[in-house]
Image (spheres, helix red, strand yellow):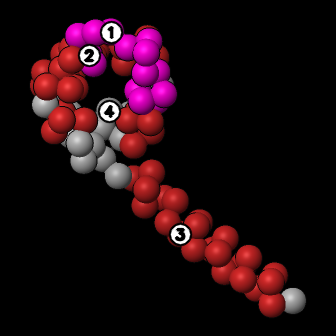
Amino acid sequence: MRTVYLLLGASAMLAWLAPAEAAKTYQYSERVQHACANDYRAHCGEYGIETSALRFCMNKAGKQLSHGCVNAARRGRSGLAR
């Protein structure tokens, strides 16, 4: 029975934290926005700009991203940072 309470408590904690993580925003530099516009439309257009879901999607697209997008993101790490 104690295990059930622990699992319920852990589930409640995750449910409380998940929306906070999803609501985080990321600011992308103008250089990154310009260089990655086509990649965004091709791979992650269904996600809102400057959201953690977009960041996850772009990271997942990885090797499919254009060299220009990847280079812009590398040049200014702040371009893809929180």
Task: Give the labeled residue for mark 2.
Answer: 69
**Does residue 45 appear in this view?**
no
Locate residue 36, reporting x and y percent.
27, 16
Q: Nearer the viewer, mark 1 or mark 4?
A: 1
Q: Quadrant of the N terminus?
A: bottom right
Q: Of 30 and 77, which appears nearest the observer?
A: 77
Q: Are marks 2 and 1 in contact (CB under 8 Å)?
A: yes
Compared across the picture, whether 54 is left or right of 17 comes to left
Disc 1 crowd rating (10 Å Cα; few below 14, some 14-19, many 20+) is few
Dot label at residue 16: 3
Q: Would you place residue 2 above or below residue 25 in this image? A: below
Q: Is residue 44 covered in magenta?
A: no
Q: Earlier in the sequence, mark 1 or mark 4?
A: 4
Query: What is the distance, in whole Å, between disc 2 and disc 3 at their CAs?
Result: 34 Å
3 or 4: tag closer to the N-terminus: 3
Q: CA distance from mark 3 to mark 1?
A: 36 Å
Q: CA distance from mark 2 to mark 4?
A: 15 Å
As shown in the figure, which amino acid type bears the numbered disc 4? Ile
Q: Kindly identify the residue that appears in the image at 45 percent across and 51 percent down.
A: 22
Label at residue 49:
4
Question: Which residue corresponds to mark 1?
Answer: 66
